[in-house]
Amino acid sequence: MNPQFAHNTWPQIKAALDSGRPVVAILPCGATEAHGNHLPLNTDNIISEGMAGFALPALEDRGIAALVLPTLAYAPADYAGGFAGTISISETAAKAVLLDIGRSLHGQGFACLAIANSHFDPANVKMLREAAEQIHALGLRVAFPDFTRRKLAQTLTDEFKAGACHAGQFETSLVMASRPELVNEGERTRSADNPVSLTDAFARGARTFEEAGGPLAYFGSPRRASSDEGVETYEKLAAALVQAISDTLQ
């Protein structure tokens, strides 16, 4: 069985579901939005896919069969709405898609839906929390490591904990570790540090990246990023996802 859900035929999926092992569907959740001058619009998709990929060996070691669903590439992203290329959808639309995915997976006999999210727009996080609760109410268990919660946030980098982490050192390191060809190195190394905390800006009522202090749609320090940090961070993200799945299946 191919770990990429959509690369299998339907008989292969049926055979996995009939095997007697719990089968988990991992849904990478991202966005299509501006990430500075140096990272691609699909940065969050890349990171969520990387998190899922890094989790697969540890899940196999625990006897858990996991399939990575096609990435959900559209989400509420109004904070980046002033930048070309950003595509934002409503919370209502995003939640409706997630609920329908959950219903379909539950009807087929999947043991769990795991949400691998790296798009931390407050509206998106709120939507994911609500969707997770409603999918669970349908009868399908949901594993959702929410990295905006303090306990998990504290396991990540100093930049992430400071809240200045949109297209900064944190996210740039992750893209450098998995898709370095998509990083504009010239723009990355020329990007001045922007230590403004998005977390604090959100709390103050900022409604756009511009209002928050990010005129180029990045926060943090892209020039300090490294692929080594990216690998280390993927391992931490994946460990949290694996633990959430294991806890959910108990």
Image (cartoon, helix red, strand yellow):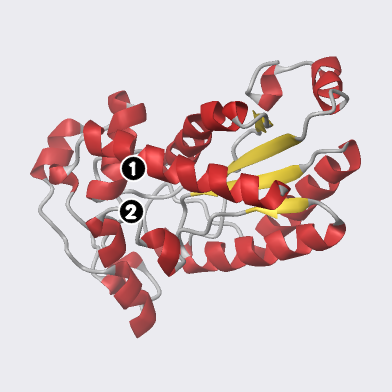
- Cα separation between marks 2 and 1: 7 Å
Q: Residue at x 85, y 58 (%)?
A: 138
Give, as a three-letter code, the residue at label 2: Leu
Residue 110 image point, x, y percent: 81, 38
**What's under tag 1, amino acid-wise?**
Thr
Asked whether disc 2 touches disc 1, contact meaning CB atoms under 8 Å apart, the reply is yes
x and y percent of residue 187 in the render?
16, 39
SS class of the residue under badge 1? Answer: helix
Where is residue 123 shown, x and y percent of the image?
A: 54, 68
Residue 84 falls left or right of residue 122: left
For label 1, count other residues whose C-alpha is less than 10 Å away and answer few (under 14), some (14-19) or many (20+): many
Q: Is residue 14 above or below residue 237?
A: above
According to the picture, the residue beneath numbered tag 1 turns out to be 233
Give the residue at mark 2.
156
Residue drawn at point x = 47 percent, y = 31 percent: 54
Name the residue rendered at 31%, 68% in the picture. 198
Viewer-nearest residue: 49 or 229: 229
